[in-house]
Amino acid sequence: MNKNMSITDILVRFDEITEHYARELDKYSMEELRRQPAEDEWSLGQMYLHLAHSALDMQLRHAEQCMEPGASEGNGEKTEAGQSVFEQGSFPPVRIRVPAGAQYTPPQPESKEQLAAKLEEARRRMHEIGASLQDAAPQRLQQTAAHPAFGALNAAEWFAMPEMHYRHHLLQKERLDAFIHPAS
């Protein structure tokens, strides 16, 4: 986590970016939210689900696991990529492709309400985990869980990930906006 970012700062930034994504939903029809630039590329709606699911099912789940009694302490280190991300406070502005498949490819959204509800669920969980982090015993904050690309991350670092991840996907959103609404 960027050493200058407090839990409160992260929550404020996460609330702001979540609100941005939620407001943006009004710009699109369901057909537009489901439109894919290519068969092997996600729609905007799939990207929205990816953001919420990553926060809920990976990043915040790992933050919680790190704070549990008996979680591994200091098992491994951050990778060079992990060091860089947390020093800069953001992911590099490059396109990351994950393998196609059920594990990584989100389903098409059912409705705008589903997307808004998932964003809100992730926002609510961020606030719950943030409160837990503030109340956690210092030794619990040293416990880590492995990230596939960034190495061993502690609870605070896992907690910082959703906001950085949402920000990173603004680039994808720009590409998808240009695809959905090409300049005339």
Image (cartoon, rainbow, N blue to C red):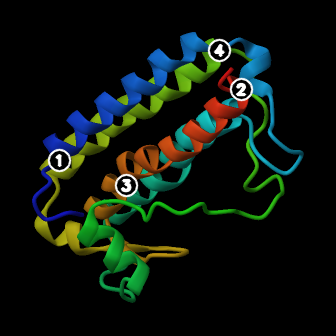
Q: Do the residues labelled 1 and 4 touch (CB within 8 Å)?
A: no
- State whether residue 71 appears in this view: no
Q: Which mark is residue 140?
A: none
Q: Are marks 2 and 4 in contact (CB under 8 Å)?
A: yes
Q: Quadrant of the C terminus?
A: top right
Residue 144 percent location from the top left of the image = 35, 74
| Disc 2 to disc 1, C-alpha distance | 36 Å
Q: Residue 64 carries which label?
A: 3
Which residue corresponds to the image point at 70% horizontal and 15% vertical from the top-left?
Answer: 111
What kind of element bears circle 4?
loop
Viewer-proximal residue among 77 and 62: 77
Which residue corresponds to the image point at 45% horizontal and 34% vertical from the top-left?
Answer: 122
Q: What residue type is labelled 1?
A: Ile
Disc 1 target residue = 7
Q: What residue type is labelled 2?
A: Ile
Please tell me which of labels 3 and 4 falls first in the chain: 4
| Disc 3 to disc 4, C-alpha distance | 34 Å
Disc 2 target residue = 180
What kind of element bears circle 2?
helix
Residue 27 percent location from the top left of the image = 58, 13
Q: Do the residues labelled 1 and 3 touch (CB within 8 Å)?
A: no
* Closer to viewer: mark 2 or mark 4: 2
Viewer-proximal residue among 20 and 73: 20
What kind of element bears circle 3?
helix
What kind of element bears circle 1?
helix
Disc 4 target residue = 28
Please tell me which of labels 2 and 1 falls first in the chain: 1
* Closer to viewer: mark 1 or mark 3: 1
Q: Are marks 2 and 1 in contact (CB under 8 Å)?
A: no
Which residue corresponds to the image point at 24% horizontal and 72% vertical from the top-left?
Answer: 87
